[in-house]
Amino acid sequence: MPAATKNIYKKLIKLTFSAMLILCLTACSFSGPFGAENGAEKLSKTDFVLDTVSTVTLYGAGDEALLERCFQLCREYELIFSRTDSRSELYALNHSGGMAVSDELLELITLARDYAELSHGAFDFTLGAVSEMYGFSSDSPRAPSDAELAAAMEHTGWEKVSIDGNIVTLIDPGAVLDLGAIAKGYIADRVAELLLENGVDSAIINLGGNVLCLGSRPDGEDFTVGLQYPFEDVSRTIANIRVRDMSVVTSGVYQRCFEQDGVFYHHILDPVTGRPCENGLLAVSVVSPRSADCDALSTVCFVLGLEDGLELVDSLEDVYAVFITEDYGLHYSKGFEDALF
Ligand code: ADP
Ligand code: MG
């Protein structure tokens, strides 16, 4: 690895923690004093949920109690979808090999399976045993040996999961489901529903960079969402886009990563090798109305790579994407610039 690249990687490792903590995308827009913007009241709360720092900002309606309910909802979903929390429903499923699951877990596993099918396995929600070995979110991440990796890869493959009514069965009992590439998007959609039911029609839900803009700014303008400049401080953006009633989600190599023996490891895995994808991409941001779709597709597109990823996005309605390559080039899907700048 060239020394300059190595230095960048060293720097990014230092930055990663703070970047993860705040945003991978900055739902910036505009800020005014005393919680009021353009005459509209603004109410905001930030908390650590879903293994990341999340912020919900309401404009013009809602109260502290509603904000608190948003975070409570996130915590409830965390107790369903977390791979690591031993109290979660997914944990129970992973350790039982098969069981009747809740409607929510069924819905998310079904959606994950749809994206696995759509992407011909690029999206693989059975990589849990592999992710676990790397421990990207832990204090001591490490790269598994070839032998460890080969053993874990024996138990991956999205077709090893069967769904019958609300009974989910791991056909290979050694398979470990991991919904980390789609859960935050799904949860953001549920938070948006909660807000709409309670009369809020202008808000930003930011679950660790998984951003959903509900409605428009209180002054009727589009929200501005800044896409983070890879490896730089979150406040530095590489592009700013204009959205309303849209979600923006990024999968980037700099979000969860570490260096070992001079090698850079990141958390988006190639389902064929179990190693981090190495395809010349630094990040993919996807924009679409539903946050679950954005979340899944940002991972899908990253794994597919620039060419196949763009082709997939161009074939989908109401989905836009920008790919950032290692040379910091920006590659937009069809219509992106017209719709979002
Ligand atoms: P983030 O976790 O930062 O939101 P992503 O949405 O891109 O980022 O999801 C990456 C996470 O998804 C990883 O941390 C891992 O748990 C899981 N994952 C890694 N590779 C894949 C893959 N090929 N398909 C599905 N999930 C994956
Ligand atoms: Mg994702």
Image (cartoon, helix red, strand yellow):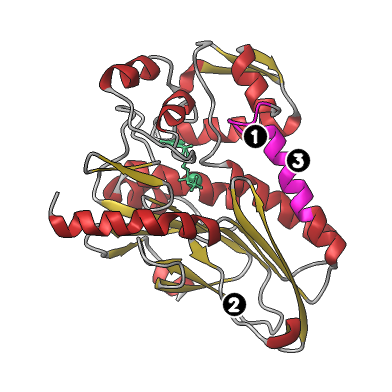
| Residue type, label 3 | Glu
- Say which residue label 2 marks: 222
SS under mark 2:
loop
User: Disc 1 marks which residue?
Assistant: 81
By secondary structure, the bulk of the magenta-drawn segment is best described as helix
> Seen in the image, is 109 located left or right of residue 26?
right
The response on whether ligand 2 sits within 8 Å of label 2 is no
Which of marks 1 and 3 precedes in the sequence? 3
Which residue is labeled 3 in the image?
76
Q: Amino acid at mark 1?
A: Phe
Residue at 60% of width from left, 47% of height from top? Answer: 184
Location of the C terminus (image quadrant): bottom left
* CA separation in Å, label 1 and label 2: 32 Å
Q: Nearer the viewer, residue 73 or 190?
A: 73
Picture coordinates of residue 179 (x, y %)?
Answer: 56, 35
Q: Is residue 74 magenta?
A: yes
Residue 306 in percent (x, y) is at 29, 51
User: Which image quadrant is residue 194 in?
Assistant: bottom right
